[in-house]
Image (spheres, coloured by chain):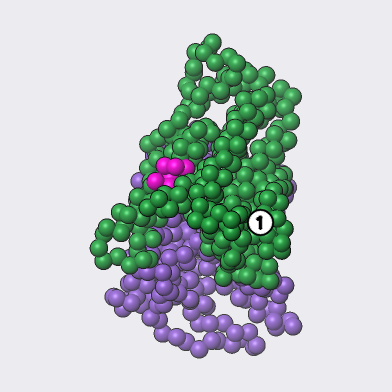
Chain colours: A green, B purple
Amino acid sequence: MISYLIFSGTIAGFYALLSLGLVMAWGQGGLVNLGLVGFVGLGAYTSALLSGAGVPIWLDWIAAAALSGAVGVALCLVVRNLRGDYLAIVTLGFAEILRLAETNEKWLTKGSDGISGIVAPFKGYLGDSFPLFYLILTWVLVGLAAFLLNGLLRSPFGRALRAVRDDEQIAAVAGKSVLRLKLQAFGMAAALSGLAGALYAHFTSFIAPDVFIVQLTIYIFLAVTIGGYTRLTGAVFGSIALVALLEATRFLAAVIPGLDAVQIASLREFAIAVTLIVVMQLRPEGAFRMTNECSGLRGSRPVQDPCHGQKTVLDDAI
Amino acid sequence: MLTDLLQYLVNGLIVGALIALPALGLTLIFSVLGFVNFSIAALLTAGAYAGWLANTTLRLPLVPVLLIAFVVAGALGVLTDRIALAPIRRKPTAQTPLMVAVVSIALSMALESAYRFSFGSGLNSFDMPIARDMKFGSIRVGLQQLHNLEIAIGLAVILALFFSLTRLGKAMRAVADNVDLARLKGIEPVRLANLATFIGMGLAGVGGALLAIDTSVDPSTGSRLILLIFAGSVVGGLTSLPGAVAGALLMGVIGELGLLVLPPVYQSLTAFVAILITLLARPGGIFSGASGVRK
C-alpha cells in the first residue's frame, strides 16, 4: 500500500511539472500548446538514449530539458503569427509527428517495442528506499520549479507576459518585445515538459511511443483546469486531484463485475474525458481563480471581474 | 515509370475523394459555427461502426448502409455538440476557441473509449462482395474504390446544389459569410448551427463507412486520419466548400506521390507539412486571392 502511494505521488509530481509548464505558457502567456506530450516524449527519449550511451544522469536531464526547450522555441518561432485554433491544429500535429518518428525510426528508438532497462539514479545504493528517494527528488524539483516560476511571474517579466496574453498590440505599444516574451514562456514550458519526460523515463525504466499519446495532453489540461489555469498553486493542486481521480476510477472500474481489461481501461478514459468536459463547462476558472495580478498594488484598487482582470493588468504593463 | 506515376495519381484521387467528405464536413462546421471541432474524428468512426453494424447484422447493401452511417453520425454529432460544446460556446471569452478545441478533443476521446468499450479494439470488416480489380490499360482500380469515388463526387454535387439552390443552403452560406448580417435578415444561427453540424458530421460518417468498407473499422479509424482531414480543409481555406474538396484531392495526390520518397507510415507528415506551409504562407488557403483574406 505504501509503495503504491509513493508510486502515485511520484506520478503526481511528473504531472505537476507538466502543469506548471502549461500554466506558464497557457495561463500566463496565452499560448496554446496541444503538443505538450510531444515535448514530454522528446525529453524522455533524449534522456533515455543519452544514459544508454553512458552519459551521467544529471547531464541527461539537463540535455532533455535543453533540447525540448530549444525545439519549443523553434516551434513557437514558426507558428508565432497563427490564431488560436490554427495553433491548436499545428501543435497537435507536431506531437503526432514526433510520435510517428518514435514509432518508426527503429534504429534510434527501437520502434513500438520501446526502450527498456533505462538506468535509475542511485538505485544500486538505495535498494528498497529508491522509490521514496525518487518521490522526494521529484517533488523537490516541482518545488524548485514552482519557486522559480513564481518569482519570475511576480517580476516585471511576468507582468509583461500577462500583458502580451491580454492584448499583444497594447503590450507592443508599451515597448514590450512580444515575440521574445512568447518564445521565453513557450520555451520554458517545453523545457519543463522535457524534464518531466526525462524524470518519468528514469523512474519507470521503460518508455514506448504508446506512453506519449494525446490522452496525456488532455490529462494535463484537466489538471490545470481543475486547479485554475492561471495559477501555479492550481497546477500543483490539480495534478494531485488528477492522480486521485485516475486512481479512483481504477478502483471503481474494478468493482464492476464482468469487464475485461480493455473495457476497464476504456471506462477510465471515458470518465477522465467526461470530467474534463464537465469541469470546463461548470467551473472553467478552476479551484484557484485568477487573482488580480497587479503585484505591488494589491488591494489598493477594486477588483474588477477577477476572472478576467485585463484592464488592471494592462495598466500595470503600461 | 509514367504508368507508375499515373497509378499513384489515381490512387491519390481515390484517397482524396474519401478524405473530401469529412474535410467538407469540417469546413462546413467551421464556416457556420466559427470553431474547429476535433470530435469529427470520432464521429467518422461512429459512421463506420454504424455502417458496419447495419451491414453485418441487418445484411443491408451499400446505399442503406451509407444512409444509416450519415444519420447516425449526424445525430450523434448534434447530440454531443449540444451536450458538450454548446455550453462553452455560449459564454465567449478570449479563451473560448482553445477551450472548444480542448473539449472537442476530450469529446473525441470519450467517444472512442465508448467504442472500445462496446466493440473492443479489434479490426472489424464489412461483409461486402469482393470484386476483381478493374484495369484501364495498365492502371488498376478496385471496383469498391471506384464506387467510393462516384459516391463522394455525387454527395459533393448534391451538397453544392443544396447550398446554391435551397433557401436553407443560402441561409447557411449567409451565416458563414457574416453572422451579424445574417441575423439582421432574420436567420436564426442556432438552428442553422445544428443543421450544419448534422450535415457535416453526417458527411464524415459516410466517409468513415466508405473507408471502412474498403479496409476495416476500429476505435481509432478516425483519429488516424485527422491530420489528413485537417490538411484537406486547411489547404482549401477552412471556409470554402469547393476549396475543401480540391484541398482533399490535392492532399490525397500529394500523399500518394510522397510514397515515392517517404515510407508509407509517414503519410501524416506530408499532411502536417502541408498544413504548416499553408497556414504560414497563405492562411486563406491556396485557392484564395493574392491578399489571402479569409472570407
| Residue B165 in sight in this render | no
- Figure quadrant of residue A102: bottom right
| In the displayed structure image, the side of residue B269 where residue B109 appears, left or right | left
Q: Mark 1 points at which residue?
A: A47
Q: Is residue B49 left or right of residue B289?
A: left
* Magenta stretch holds residue B263: no
Vertical side of A169 occupied by A24: above or below: below
Residue A166 higher or lower than A37, as above or below: above
Q: Nearer the viewer, residue A315 or A244?
A: A244
Q: Measuring 66% from the left and 25% from the top, which residue is drawn there?
A: A155
Q: Which residue lies furthest to the front in this view?
A: A125
Give x and y (percent) for residue A146.
58, 35
* Residue A241 part of the magenta segment: yes
Rendered residue at 35%/50% (across/down) = A248
The spot of residue B68 in percent (x, y) is 35, 66
Residue B62 is left or right of residue A172, and the answer is left
The quarter in which the C terminus of chain A is drawn is top right
Span of residues in magenta: A239-244
Query: Residue B10 location, x and y as percent?
Result: 62, 76
Residue at 45%, 62% in the rendered image: B44
